[in-house]
Image (cartoon, grey):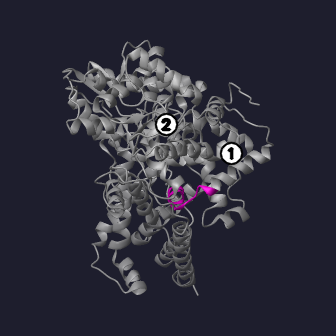
Amino acid sequence: MSTATATPLFDKQGEHSDEARVDAAMRSFVREFGVTAALHMESCVRCGMCAEACHFYAASGDAKHTPVHKLDLFRRAYFREASPFAPVVRALGLVKKPSVAELERWQELIYDSCTMCGRCTLVCPMGIDIAELVKEARHGMFKAGLIPERLALMDRTARQWGSPATPAEDLPDILAEVSEQYNVAIPCDLDHADMLVTAAPAELGDHTKALADAAKILNRLGVKWTMHRAGFDASNVGFNNGDLQLQERLTRALIDTAVKIGAKTVLLPECGHAYGAARWEAAKWYGQALPVRIVHMTEFLDEVISAGRIRLHQIGETATFHDPCQIVRRGGLEAAARRVLAALGFELIELKDHGIAGYCCGGGGGVVSNQRAAPLRHKVFEIKKNQVEATGAKRFVTSCGQCRITLEMGAKHAHWDRKTESLLELVADNLAD
Amino acid sequence: MDLLDFARGPALTFALAIFVGGTLWRLFGVLLLPRLRDLSLPREGAPAPLAGALRTIARRMWPRREFAQATLFITLNSYVFHIGLAVVVFGLAPHILFIRQLTGLSWPALPSNLVFGAGVITLFALVAVLARRLLHPVVRLLSGVGDYLSWLLTALPVATGLLASGHLGARYETLLALHVLSIAAFLVWFPFGKLMHAVLFAFSRGATGIRFSHRGVNV
């Protein structure tokens, strides 16, 4: 059962007692405190500089959107249960245990108004990785059954289907339709292949052109590749929702499928959180370095273009680029995206804030799927819109499908007549013979 | 035993014991927690973890260009009172004498007038810090009793030191005793509140430096 209310903004999953919810959250919180998380909890000087980096604070001007404030309950859990002075803190009652009402109110801060983009991590004079701590805090909220219902719905679907939008058994039919529509071969469920190619949910729905374009490039290169029902959706909603069990299942589906078919590479779609989950976190489930290479689409395009394996027509127009946070700030692919843009013959005019310090689209971390967060998200969109307009660039490009959806929704709401283009689609559309 | 003897003797000894013991307890209590190794393949060309840590420790000494304007006041003011405190603590002849008695280490003193001037500037900067904490909605929201206590116990030694130097308000011995007692209070509180950032900042920045240099991001 779930309950949704307009104010305060929280939903509940399951029928647990209030006490059971608090206990589940606290048990999960305490498990998160390894040495890095603890160092980051301990070293905050409460200076408030992180507010200056946050797009939600910039949009609302409300102090409650200060990034480190969003960690308040997690921080209290730390000092009560896990810090070196925890026994004294508890004995003297210096820090109160969070109540269920506080956890409920907190949902709005760590789900609706944080995209885990990590811009705050860049400004913190103590180097605290606030975004990572928010992600860890979400694990406890999931255990407590206190996440936005939209995300919970996607979670339940992904547990059943292996994807929040597409049942695995429908994949062959969808691929056949895309294949026919775009006249491109899309192999499915091959027993052996060198590369396992994965998709983001939208590529099996609204963004099928991106999928067809990936196929077009891979076929041109003569790669032996396949998509596979056993592991096809790389977006990993478990990563966003705080559902560690689902995150592990979805991760293992990709890696184990790749190993089973003898693939050496898993190609990730233009999706930010897919990169965060598979590239940087997958190995922890295996306890060792992965037996396969994880490559983001942007990285792949950069490699094949740099190696001269594909050549491109020169577009010769001005363009600006939105840096997806999980791919650039938290992923390290800033230069790769720019090399691909240069290969397309774009004259790049950078946004005022770009590269690793670029502003988030406002929809990451599940915020784009969380409909009650839309009013604030639309305000955040204004930041990006203004920066894009200030460049005067003719084209607006990005390399994350989720960012594209967020930016397209923002543009529609703001009646802004600008298209957000996919880097992958631009490469596919400009392949030279 | 008069007040000055008490301050210089048992009070300071007790405070130093708490300072050293508490600081080590808190630091190692954190550093000995489980360490999850990053098993993902590092980005090609990523620096060694120690180099990544040192790079971020150095880089966070000054804000990035994008944040420089918005954080200009707090950055400059923080530099003023941190450098001011260092000049006062390590530059004044009697302080150096005290440190030599404690550790055997010593170095040339700065002119006392210069140190006095640094103390006055430091106190003004600390007042500005407090004003910001009370007036800025973000910082006010983030502030708890510990933050105000940390401020008070940092400002008191500076204020009492200036009064003692200037022989203002009471007998010199009384002012000096109050100064030493305020330092003792600072040392006792140090391991428990955010003053501990003086030790933790390098570890905290370093951990983030290691995480992101592994990914090929220079944070």
Residue A242 is situated, as x and y percent measured from the top left of the image, at: 60, 43
The amino acid type, in three-letter code, at marker 1 is: Lys
Give the image quarter of residue A169: top right
Residue receiving disc 1: A143
Over which residues does the magenta segment extend? A31-41
Q: Residues within 10 Å of mark 2 (few under 14, many from 20)?
A: many
**Residue found at x 71% / y 27%:** A4
Instruction: Indicate the secondary structure of the residue bearing disc 1.
Output: helix
Q: Is residue A40 magenta?
A: yes
Q: Is residue B106 left or right of residue A148?
A: left
**Residue sitting at x 68%, y 42%:** A103
- What amino acid type should be assigned to the residue bearing mark 2? Ala
Q: Is residue B158 magenta?
A: no
Q: Residue B94 vs residue A244: left or right?
A: left
Q: Which residue corresponds to the image point at 36% horizontal and 54% vertical from the top-left?
A: B42
The chain containing the residue under callout 1 comes to: A
Against B116, residue A141 (above or below) is: above
- Pick the front one: B66 or A114: A114
Rendered position, A111 above or below B217: above
Give the class, few, some or many, for how many residues have Cα within 10 Å of label 1's Cα (few <14, many ≥20): many
The N terminus of chain A lies in quadrant: top right
Image location of residue B145, percent across then percent down: 60, 55
Give the residue at x 38% y 58%: B81
Residue bearing mark 2: A234
Quarter of the image for residue A212 reads: top left
